[in-house]
Image: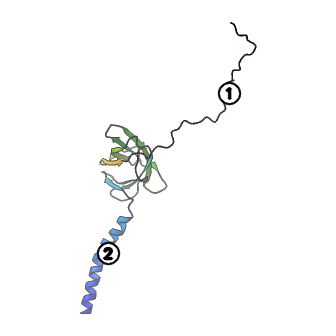
C-alpha cells in the first residue's frame, strides 16, 4: 500500500512541476509587456518608464527573436510610431542596447489619452519592414507644472542710465 501511495505522490508532483515552472516564469516578465509575432519575428514590447505620462520621455524596450529558431536578432532596424485620437503623431527609430536582441527608443507624447501604436522591424536594410499588430496605450496627464514665474535675468543691465542735464535752463 505504501509503494502505491509513493508512486501516486510522485505522479502528482511530476504533473504539477510544469505549472509551477510556468508560474515562476510569468513573474519574470516586465509589467505591461506585450507580445507579437510577424512572419519572421517574435517581438516583446514594454514601457520601461512607468507610469506613461504626456510631456515626459517614455522609454520603450523591444526584444526581437527569430520566430523559427528563437535566436535574438542583432543589427536589426525598426521604429515605433503612435497616433492619438486628435491625430497627433510621433515616431522614433530603435537603437541597439548591449543585450542580445534588445532595442530601446524614447517617445514623447504631446497629449494625454488613448494612443494607437505600431512597430515595424527588419533584420537588415536588404529586407522589407514587417509590422506587428497595432495596440493601444493609455497615456496619463502630465504632472502638475512647476514654477512658471517670470525668470530673473542674471546678467547686469548694460544700457546707460540717462542723467538729467542740469545745464539746461527751463524756458518760460
Q: Position of residue 54 (x, y in %)?
A: 41, 44
Q: Position of residue 41 (x, y in %)?
A: 34, 53
Which residue occupies the extreme front position in the image? 172
Determine whether 138 is above or below 88 in the image. Answer: below
- Looking at the rendered image, the quarter that the N terminus falls into is bottom left
Q: Nearer the viewer, residue 60 or 108?
A: 108
Residue 109 falls in image quadrant: top left
Which badge, 2 or 1, comes first in the chain's sequence? 2
Residue 88 falls in image quadrant: top left
Question: Is residue 128 in sight in this rendering?
Answer: no
Query: In 3D space, how far apart are the residues under numbered discs 2 and 1 (Cα atoms)?
Result: 79 Å
Which secondary structure lies at badge 1? Answer: loop
Q: Position of residue 43 (x, y in %)?
A: 35, 54
Residue in view at x 25 percent, y 88 percent: 5
Question: Is residue 28 in sight in this rendering?
Answer: yes
Residue in view at x 32 percent, y 58 percent: 68
Disc marking residue 17:
2
Which secondary structure lies at badge 2? Answer: helix
Q: Bin the neighbour count of mark 2 within 10 Å (Cα to Cα): few under 14, some 14-19, many 20 and up.
A: few
Q: Position of residue 38 (x, y in %)?
A: 31, 51
- Looking at the rendered image, the quarter that the C terminus falls into is top right
- Relative side of 151 to 34, left or right: right
Q: Nearer the viewer, residue 164 or 169?
A: 169
- Relative side of 3 to 150, left or right: left
Q: Mark 1 = which residue? A: 158
Please identify, in this view, whether the residue under mark 2 or under mark 1 is nearer the observer: 1
Q: Bin the neighbour count of mark 1 within 10 Å (Cα to Cα): few under 14, some 14-19, many 20 and up.
A: few
Amino acid at each position: 500500500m505504501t509503494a502505491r501511495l509513493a508512486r501516486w505522490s510522485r505522479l502528482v508532483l511530476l504533473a504539477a512541476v510544469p505549472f509551477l515552472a510556468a508560474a515562476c516564469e510569468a513573474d519574470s516578465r516586465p509589467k505591461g509587456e506585450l507580445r507579437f509575432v510577424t512572419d519572421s519575428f517574435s517581438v516583446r514590447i514594454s514601457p520601461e518608464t512607468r507610469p506613461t505620462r504626456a510631456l515626459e520621455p517614455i522609454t520603450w524596450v523591444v526584444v526581437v527573436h527569430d520566430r523559427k529558431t528563437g535566436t535574438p536578432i542583432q543589427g536589426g532596424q525598426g521604429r515605433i510610431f503612435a497616433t492619438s485620437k486628435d491625430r497627433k503623431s510621433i515616431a522614433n527609430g530603435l537603437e541597439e542596447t548591449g543585450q542580445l536582441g534588445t532595442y530601446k527608443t524614447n517617445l514623447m507624447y504631446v497629449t494625454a489619452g488613448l494612443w494607437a501604436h505600431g512597430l515595424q522591424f527588419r533584420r537588415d536594410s536588404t529586407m522589407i519592414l514587417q509590422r506587428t499588430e497595432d495596440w493601444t496605450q493609455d497615456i496619463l496627464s502630465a504632472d502638475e507644472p512647476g514654477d512658471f514665474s517670470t525668470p530673473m535675468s542674471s546678467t547686469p543691465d548694460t544700457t546707460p542710465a540717462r542723467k538729467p542735464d542740469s545745464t539746461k535752463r527751463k524756458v518760460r
